[in-house]
Amino acid sequence: MRSEDIEKFWEESVSKELNENKKESGEKYKRVLNAAIKIFSKRGFAGSRTSEIAKEADVAEGTIFRYFPKKEDILMEMIIPLVIKFYRPILLEKNRKILEKSKKESITELLETIFKERYHLIDENMDILKILCIEALYNKDIRTLFTEKISEDILNLGLGVVEAQKEQGEVRDIESKQILRAGMSMLIGYILLNRFVPSFFKSEPEEDFKVLVDILINGIGSKKETKSEK
Amino acid sequence: MRSEDIEKFWEESVSKELNENKKESGEKYKRVLNAAIKIFSKRGFAGSRTSEIAKEADVAEGTIFRYFPKKEDILMEMIIPLVIKFYRPILLEKNRKILEKSKKESITELLETIFKERYHLIDENMDILKILCIEALYNKDIRTLFTEKISEDILNLGLGVVEAQKEQGEVRDIESKQILRAGMSMLIGYILLNRFVPSFFKSEPEEDFKVLVDILINGIGSKKETKSEK
DNA sequence: CATAAAAGTGAGTATTCACTCATGATTAAT
DNA sequence: ATTAATCATGAGTGAATACTCACTTTTATG
């Protein structure tokens, strides 16, 4: 897929998503995509062989090239729907809800909700997100997609939430960027540590988040007020 | 390199390190290694070509195979010294210092020092660390090296520091693991966000760390009561 | 300087792998 | 049922690439 086609593909994909994927929804098309997610995630894009994908999907190797003229097209066609899956719910549906919530709920409840939701969304899509993040490091088109379609908007949404909380006097008067960064860092760091050093994580994420949010809000420093937790 | 050779290579490398790299220190050996770091970091291990490495290092392709019989050996021989470079200073030299400091300095100073040191160590070795982290996902030997030789010990060191602080009443009585996790998450998350979304980071890391540490210690929540610094 | 050993080279090779295509199978249309 | 159109196949192909090796150049030794 050429770089200049991405914008077009993006538009098509968005409307396709809305129309419940009429096209390209042959059974084998999906089998190939799912097999590719599994293989790419295990070996990386460049380290994966189309022959192995075919075997995993239980189709002939030629069938792959019926749907995806180039190997790279498999990558792009799995990543673009992913971007939509993350992008749309985050920006279109949840956006309002979160901002609404952020005016009603306490900051603790709000953060726990956000952490839990994001964590599960990320955890359920871990294989393909792994592919997205890693290949974004090597492939300019993917990187562009990532930064232009996702990061900018997510950051702005996050800043909105932080500022709403600030207005209610729930958070300290630190630059919003810094606050958002601390929160996002914690979530990202938690997920990565969880994956890389699972031995370090024996408790349930749900429980961990309560502590994590507590630390984010109240810090790790000892205060005079006795907040006894174990 | 076969899996069972790694332990041997590890031992050899440790003594080599101590003896100031007597062997294998031909000029071209190093040129190839440095070129490989650059190329692997840009394209990933599987996506890199030995021809490109040769070009980058300005040696003949055959020369590479004089020093590294298999392409994979380049990867292993860059990663093992890296593990030593990170592992030894962290565990042997700094270990005592940090634990000493953790008994003298305030938690704020301590954390700022640790964050700064770790950040610079990581930042200066970003290319090769990127290779280590990514290839650990695909290569069992590297993954083993990573978890067995690094993570366990770093975590234990971290826990030691946290507990020393606890004894001095500098941190709240939360499970040490959780506290360490929060701190590590913040640092890792910061570094990654910094790399992935540089547009989000206009300030200097040194300045950011002060805020980051402040947030880690005091939290983002607004407090009515005055904070107690010790 | 003579000789041997070590380091370095790059054209050549064997293999791997993304992709093609001629043919067969399946479905849809008339 | 006949025809047309689409879907599916896997042996085959050409290009790419990790690795080899016969040879050249450099360095070390007496």
Image (cartoon, coloured by chain):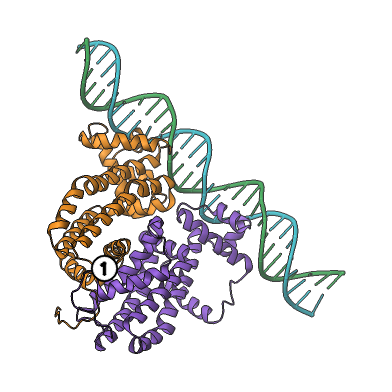
Chain colours: A orange, B purple, C green, D cyan
Q: Position of residue A115 (x, y in %)?
A: 20, 60
Crowd class of label 1 (few under 14; some 14 to 19; many from 20; radius 10 Å):
few
Instruction: Check the image and report above or below for A18 versus B67.
Output: above
Residue C26, image quadrant: top left
For the residue pair B194 and A196, the one nearer the viewer reads as: B194
Q: Which chain does the residue under circle 1 lie in? A: A
Instruction: Check the image and report above or below for D22 versus B117.
Output: above
Residue A6, image quadrant: top left
Q: Position of residue A208 (x, y in %)?
A: 19, 68
For the residue pair A68 and B42, the one nearer the viewer reads as: B42
**A198 to the left or right of B206:** left
Q: Is residue B70 visible?
A: no
Residue at 39%, 87% in the rendered image: B96
Q: Position of residue A201 (x, y in %)?
A: 23, 70
Q: Which residue is mark 1?
A: A198
Q: Quadrant of the N terminus of chain A?
A: top left
Residue at 29%, 65% in the rendered image: A182
For the residue pair C30 and B84, the one nearer the viewer reads as: B84
Q: Position of residue A29 (x, y in %)?
A: 28, 37
